[in-house]
Amino acid sequence: MSNDPSIAAIAPLRGEFSCATTEIGFLHQQSAVILRDLRRGLLLSSLFYLVFGAADIAALGLEGAAAPLLARLTIPFIAMACLYYARRPNAGVRAPCHAASAFTLLWGASYFVVISYRPGDILLHAMSWAVMAMVIHILIPNRLICAATISIGATLAFLALAWHQHAVGTRFLTSLTMLLICANVFGVTVAQRHARLWREQYWAQQVLTNLSIRDPLTGSYNRRHLNAGLLDGEIARARRYRLSLSLIMCDLDGFKKINDTYGHHAGDEMLRSFATLVQTMTRDAIDTVVRYGGEEFLIILPETRLDGALELAERVRAAFAEQRVEVDGVQLGTTASFGVVGAEFGGSHAVTPQGMIALADQLMYEAKHAGRNLVRAKQLGQRVETVGRTG
Ligand SMILES: Nc1nc2c(ncn2[C@@H]2O[C@H](COP(=O)(O)OP(=O)(O)OP(=O)(O)O)[C@@H](O)[C@H]2O)c(=O)[nH]1
């Protein structure tokens, strides 16, 4: 999660995150809530519309109400088709918005069919459209811009029709115009506020989650995140898709001496520089760097075979041995030792997170005892097959 405040900025008019990636992340994370709200909104709108079929029968009689009733009866089917479209597997995060737009457009069209059969009841229709305009904004989850375009467009069409038909006098026409303007303004304002509050709440939750799973000193993930099933999840995925998975355990060499000689702040700088180096040398959003202990880091490498992990460990080892950190005008440097474990999930291995970590730890300690600044690697279930060279 970046510290750049612009990624959390909310565009005031659209009520969406200005950063497209953040908005997509939000839609992904909230997809279940959005689908639930869409289902509720569409079912309630259909119901509301069907109940008003009784008013058609009262106004036009059973025979005269047949055509408007038919128009109303199509709405639940359209709602079901839209829900089906939004809930398809791999439908995409924008699918509920497309479904909401399609439904509200057809809902509006069917409303115009109904009013064409009852031109004399223009005031009643205006009240009913005022309710529908608010439902479009408040009850049916859609992009604010889409909902507003459909609702305001249909309102203008309705006013043009009322004006054209001369169904009411100027005084009433002015009143119903005001009513519909108020309904739209009210709807847009509430929808905008809801969109903003929802996103602010989501972002606050992201920040808190991030704080609880990251180590504040290095920005790496912490043990809590690891213990919450991070490695279990990767092992389960590797097992399911028969993939490779590797781990690297790293530990800084002679770290206590740096602390004792130059102070803890120098040690902290050294930890930070090591973590930054590892983070820049690993794949974004695929590999995970965990601060496992004081000066011990665990790197989880999904879909990575032992030879790839060994190559990475060797590159990090060499780069860190060269790296210098300036603290109080003094250039400080140290080395690190590495234990690398690779596992292939093609067969029926009994691989556990604890087993993989324990082996990586053991290999790292072997590298320490063999002289430090070393990489030791092993394929799970085999003998130690590769030993990195001293720098
Ligand atoms: N500055 C700083 N020091 C830490 C932090 N966490 C742990 N340490 C220190 O790291 C040191 C680790 O010492 P040791 O376990 O003896 O490791 P080492 O000196 O690197 O020795 P080898 O690993 O055998 O090379 C201890 O002095 C801890 O106090 C931290 O967040 N910041």
Image (cartoon, grey):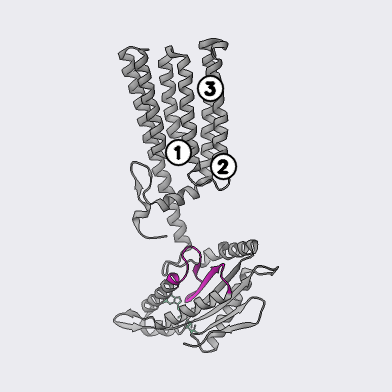
N-term-proximal mark, 3 vs 2:
3
Q: Name the disc covering residue 142, or none.
A: 1
Highlighted magenta segment, given as a residue range: 278-305
Q: What residue type is labelled 3?
A: Ala
Position of 142 relative to 283 (above/below): above
Q: Using residue 359 as the reference point, say whether residue 334 is left or right of it.
A: left
Residue plotted at (50% across, 67% down): 287
| Nearer to the camera, 300 or 76 | 76
Q: Position of residue 35 (x, y in %)?
A: 53, 41
Please report whichever mark, 3 or 1, sits nearer to the chain's N-terminal start.
Answer: 3
What residue sits right under mark 3 in the picture?
A: 71
**Magenta segment includes 295:** yes
- Is the residue indicated by label 3 positioned so its CB lies within 8 Å of ligand 1? no
- Residue 351 position, x and y percent, is 66, 69
Residue 335 position within the rendered picture, expressed as x and y whole percent measured from the top left: 44, 83
Regarding mark 2 in the picture, which secondary structure is present there?
helix
For badge 2, the amino acid type reads: Arg
Kindly identify which residue carries mark 2: 87
